[in-house]
Image (spheres, coloured by chain):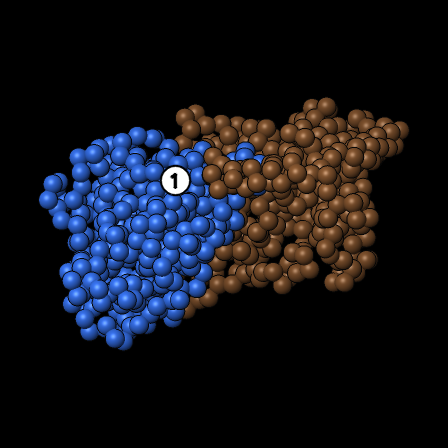
Chain colours: A blue, B brown
Amino acid sequence: MALKSPVVFGVLSRLSRRSFSSSKALFSKPVTVRDALNQAIEEEMERDERVFVMGEEVAQYDGAYKVTRGLWKKYGDKRVIDTPITEMGFAGIAVGAAFAGLRPICEFMTFNFSMQAIDHIINSAAKTFYMSAGAVPVPIVFRGPNGAASGVAAQHSQCFGAWFAHCPGLKVVMPYSSEDAKGLLKAAIRDPDPVVCLENEMLYGVPFPMSDEAQSNEFVLPFGKAKVEREGKHITVVCAGRATDTALIAANELAGKGIECEVINLRSLRPLDFDTIARSVAKTHHIVTVEQGWPSCGIGAEICARLMESSTFFELDAPVWRVTGADVPMPYATTLEALALPRPPDVLAAVTGVLGARIDQASAQ
Amino acid sequence: MALKAGVRVFRLNGLRPAVRLLSTHTRPEVQNAQNSKVAEFPGARAPYISELKFVSETSYDPIPIYRVLDHNGEVIDSKEEPAIEKDTLVNMYKTMVQLSQMDKILYESQRQGRISFYMTNYGEEGIHVGSAAALSPSDLVFAQYREVGVLLYRGMTVTEIVNQCYGNCEDPGKGRQMPVHYGSKQHNFVTLSSPLATQMPQAVGAAYALKRVPNNDRCVICYFGDGAASEGDAHAAFNFAATLDCPIILMCRNNGYAISTPTREQYRGDGVASRGPALGILTARVDGTDPLAVYNAIRAARDHALRHNRPALIEAMSYRVGHHSTSDDSTAYRSLEEIQKWNNDENPIQKFKMYLERKGYWDAGSDEALQKEARDLVVKTMQQAEKKQLPPWKEMFEDVYHDMPPRIQKQVKELEDHLAVYGEHYALDTFKPE
């Protein structure tokens, strides 16, 4: 069952919606996601001469969202390339450069525009290694902000996580924190296969603590390994990217009511770390998924299917609920926009619904 | 003020006379002295005028079509005859004949249901061998789908080509592509992609990668048709080739038809070549039924590309004598007379044969033997290809990712276990053992 109850909790949510930083910068200096991505690209360009960045406004302008800040000054036109406004053109050029042995980072100003280039991503990047019988590897990263930003309406506010995760040949990562961003992007650049890195514009400016380990040049995160952001014993909440923030806010609130959520940040959508989900469900026996994308054939749907098809099904004490973006093109009106995205109250309602009778026990204690 | 085409002649040291073709510049002519002040907008430096003038395709002379041979295979201007050794000329001719015989037999084999699909190359053999001979074997080829003559010239065997079409265990592509979707790392020929024109920006990207190699001596050649030139990818490729200064030859095979769409419905204006100067690309138009004209143009374009890291666009005019593919019957949209006229009057193989005969390099006796030899080779190869086993079944799990993920490994194991028990119910002997 897909849950989207926008009306009930609409008012509550607006108070908490913009408060992103759920992790506290206690032990290390805070770094924004933008700076973490910038570090990742710079370190990999330093490490490997074949790595270069291509996209609209990435050079002198430092990137539309300043992710490539300073790179053009340091590496020049040869390795930081501004392109004309032709996604299918520069995506194809980047794929061709990868065919010929370079390691391109292809920046889409936002992933909304990647649809112009999707033939190169799916039919060429994802399949050429296979179709060439292993003769032509395609080590390429497609990256940029994905999902809803703010006030930019239907054609610029959508999550492509499920779209790309659908396709064999691609690997798909969706970082949440600064450590995620740096570790996953660096791993993506080093990977022999094409990787889609789905960032989020609203998270770019958010500072997260970064450990000394994560500050190092050699910090990479493995694909297909989720991170347990918060341990809990009552219910598992699976999320990725910006939805992690929503889930963590809801989890904080629920903790005050005696419900301990185990929040799992997937980090990569393909490969998907089902083992971590299964282990958690074996402990909590309840699960809710949270994503910004549409419900149909979404990441939550995939997790539900995998639960059904595995022995984890027998661990469940209640049906799975999905919290997703509303199944509509993104409205332009500010109020409707806020209601079309998953908010902490939606997660709260889903968790409460799934746990059912146990809610009463928890509040009675 | 009128706009006129001016053909300027560059006589650069070491460049062949054919470079003249590549220097079609269109320059505005300023007539009114009082209006000659040049505006310096960021987007254009051009003179101001006080009378509104539109320009159209008729403001320019059409870009001329360069040829070396007339339709009887006679050299028109001896200065233009390239100095190609006898062995190379004969090899070019033999490749054209082999290609044509292969087309006949593989086309028929599709009609008989032996293979699922085929595309012939009739009428364009001269473009294949003329360009292949002018390139270095190390130059990287991004082809569309009708360029198998380039592979033949580079040394891919008829056996390898037939095995690809039959998708058997000796197909270098492991039986994963439709027939005619060739690829060969050894021959610097990138595996074909079905969606039209995707190869074009990719070819420019590869040229960009080559440019970065110290002392680079390789260029990229990208073949595409008059129909593909209408794809957005084509425009992107042209614009990026120019703005990124890439050593690439953009080789348009304008054969008059995109499946059923004739060029008069494909574009307005002076063909594909006219887009070159508009985007800052050195451009020439040649007679694609004349292998020597193609050779000269590609030689000069290659020299330009490598010397200056700049792109060149060649539009080779020809006529697609065969159907688009085995999924097409072209008599539905064009007359037999039209096809026969082009096949008889401007047949690249006939033209080139007459040229060789005139030079004393070839005679009717050798020709009869060659035709038979070429035909027999394909027939024999085809018979062998049909008997070969299919690729090992386990290969279907490979190459989706660089390292096989555990999920796919598990599927392999499941199939292994299944076949261990129920193998007798499957025609496992049709697959090659690992």
| Residue at position x 66%, y 38% in the image | B421
Amino acid under disc 1: Pro
Residue A26 position (above or below residue A322) = above
Residue A104 position (above or below residue A348) = above
The residue beneath circle 1 is A104
Crowding at dot 1, Cα within 10 Å, few <14 / some 14-19 / many 20+, comes out as many
Query: Does residue B47 show up?
Result: no
Q: Is residue A22 left or right of residue B223?
A: left
- Residue A212 at what x, y percent from top left? 17, 35
Question: SS of the residue at dot 1?
Answer: strand
Frontmost residue, A63 versus B45: A63
- Residue B43 at what x, y percent from top left? 34, 55
Q: Quadrant of the C terminus of chain B?
A: top right
| Residue at position x 54%, y 33% in the image | A135
Query: Does residue A362 show up?
Result: yes
Name the image quarter holding residue A183.
top left
- Residue A208 at what x, y percent from top left? 17, 47
- Residue B293 at what x, y percent from top left? 66, 39
| Residue at position x 42%, y 28% in the image | B213
The residue furthest left is A26
Frontmost residue, A149 versus B425: B425
